[in-house]
Image: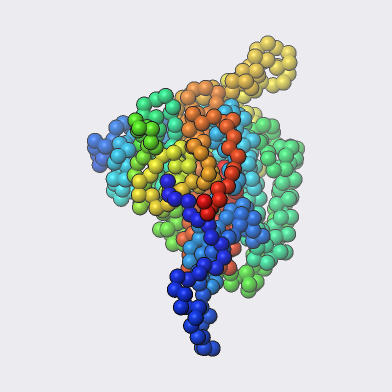
Amino acid sequence: MSLAVLQRAKELLGDTIKSTHSYRGDDTLVVDAAAIVEVMRLLKDEVGMDFLVDLTCVDYLGREPRFEVVYHLRSMKTGERLRVKAPLDEPEDGSNPALDSVVPLWAGANWFEREVWDLYGIRFHNHPDLRRILMYEEFVGHPLRKDYPKERRQPLVRRDPNE
Amino acid sequence: MAEAKKLVLGVQEPEDQSEYDREFSDDDELPTEPMTLNMGPSHPAMHGTVRIILTVEGETVKSGDVQVGYLHRCFEKEAEHATWTQVFPYTDRLNYVSPMLNNVGYALAVEKLLGVVERIPERAQYIRVIVGELSRITDHLTATAAGAMELGAMTIFFWCIKGREWIYELLEELSGARLTHSYVRVGGVAYDLTPNFADKVQALFPKLEKILKDVGDTTLELSFFRDRMDGTGVISRERAIQYGWTGPALRSTGIPYDVRKDHPYLVYDRFDFEVPVGSKGDNFDRFIVRIEEIRQSMKILAQAFAQIAPGKVVLDDPRIILPPKQEVYNSIEGMIGHFKLIVDGIKVPPGEVYSYTEGGNGELGFYIVSDGTGRPYKCRVRPPCFCIVSALPELIKDRPLADIVPTFDMMNMIGGECDR
């Protein structure tokens, strides 16, 4: 049943799909990060994957591309599920990698994307309020990156708001 | 990065100073200015550590900035440095009013990646259902208790907490810990049920039913309770789906999505139970959906005790399960096997899976990535109440200040799960 979703998505999305695979019953689409909003819109409206279950990121340090933003979708009508992955490389100039926000499609993506920004340092264009969410505002760095040492301590020093 | 907002507490001066100099007559409404109020992180009417920066105009909330994260303890970072088995104690502390459900959810995710889900002994699957449903009852009892208490119905709080304590005592007898059970293992459960466990649980049913009836009867008649719960915190089906709501909160809007029914795992397809739904999507619906779900959990428990058969409680696979102590102390193979599993951890094949179960608050998902070593490469938990709380700013906007308390309560935000 779930293969049907992959099939429909493949026909609909064509070249934006880089690869697909199924493992342990989970179907995965790997798509072009630049086209993520368009892909998500089509999957939501045309394929019926109308529920954003989860949004997270994985840091494959030492691999090209380094990051993968991972979306989990579900169809409320049929119960089918799909994983969409958008590989993302670090820009050469050392700035934060970025892709478009899916908040216009799902309001629930707001906090998920803030969390990914907070913990992995991935920027989301057109996000209404991209602030840290789990860590405090003064925190330096992004703790879930593989090159952030687990032992590093950062005492919380409050800035004077009037400075 | 968005610029850090400046936090200015107290009355803000209006830009137009002439408002101060105006003459007022008795017919005028009292002028109000937007005021910034700080609710939390420790507020007597908010269980859980969360901070809401409110802009209020009189009694009406104009906007609320909900700030979570006070209970962040780096669940993922710690998990990436622990063996697969060592993650169980961390999962206990996710939703700490239903630790067993987290244990089961995580174990199922690792087993899915190992490809052994079908081989888990049937008795272990039944035991997981039993402890999971007991945990669901404690979760819902806590949510209803705290919700009622914060609206002033202290008696209901004591009734529910008393019922929760009975179950905690049984789970303590089973696992040795009142709250942080760490009872489930990859491949089964740590040990078999204690003698007469089924009788002890079933002896609780009439007492729990009495509590539920009392709570139901009382809350239906308590006018201050109904006034503050009925028609407050209303969310439409579309918005609930937009925000990724699951569990009792989503079912209060009338959508009967329950992972146990829609994607049966363990042996849930063998039980006869209903999925209660609400109609209006308000706080009272969320309250009674939880009360009814406790009844359904008891129904599942009764069937599980009737169906459970004797047998093994762990998978028979030395690559996953620790050898019996007898072998560890008396044979070289046993000792090496024990040593390898403790030091290196279970070897999970490289790959990624997303596994989901019905937690206390909704779909509890684990997205785990393995690189073939004994430690998770990534261990992400999809916290159901994180999504639910993210809708709080929308639900309290343009509503009276007093509505925040019931709306927040019925979201059942559990700091450990939301902030991880």
Q: How many marks?
A: 0
Where residue B46 sits, quadrant-wise, is bottom right
Q: Depth check: B149 or B164 in front?
A: B149
Location of residue A121 in the rendering, given as x and y in whole percent from the top left corner: 44, 38
The answer to whether residue B259 of the structure is visible from this angle is no
Residue located farthest toward the front when viewing the structure as drawn: A163
Residue located farthest toward the top when viewing the structure as drawn: B332
Q: Is residue B112 left or right of residue B297?
A: left
Q: Depth check: B8 or A133 in front?
A: B8
Which residue is found at the position 59% from the left and 20% from the top? B344
Location of residue A162 in the rendering, given as x and y in whole percent from the top left corner: 52, 54
Which residue is found at the position 39% from the left and 42% from the top? A123
What colouring style does the render use?
Answer: rainbow
Q: Is B318 rendered above or below residue B33?
A: above
Location of residue A78 in the rendering, given as x and y in whole percent from the top left corner: 38, 47
Which residue is found at the position 44% from the left and 27% from the top? A61
Which residue is found at the position 69% from the left and 21% from the top? B324
Q: Quadrant of the C terminus of chain B?
A: top right
Location of residue B326 in the rendering, given as x and y in whole percent from the top left corner: 73, 18
The answer to whether residue A155 of the structure is visible from this angle is yes
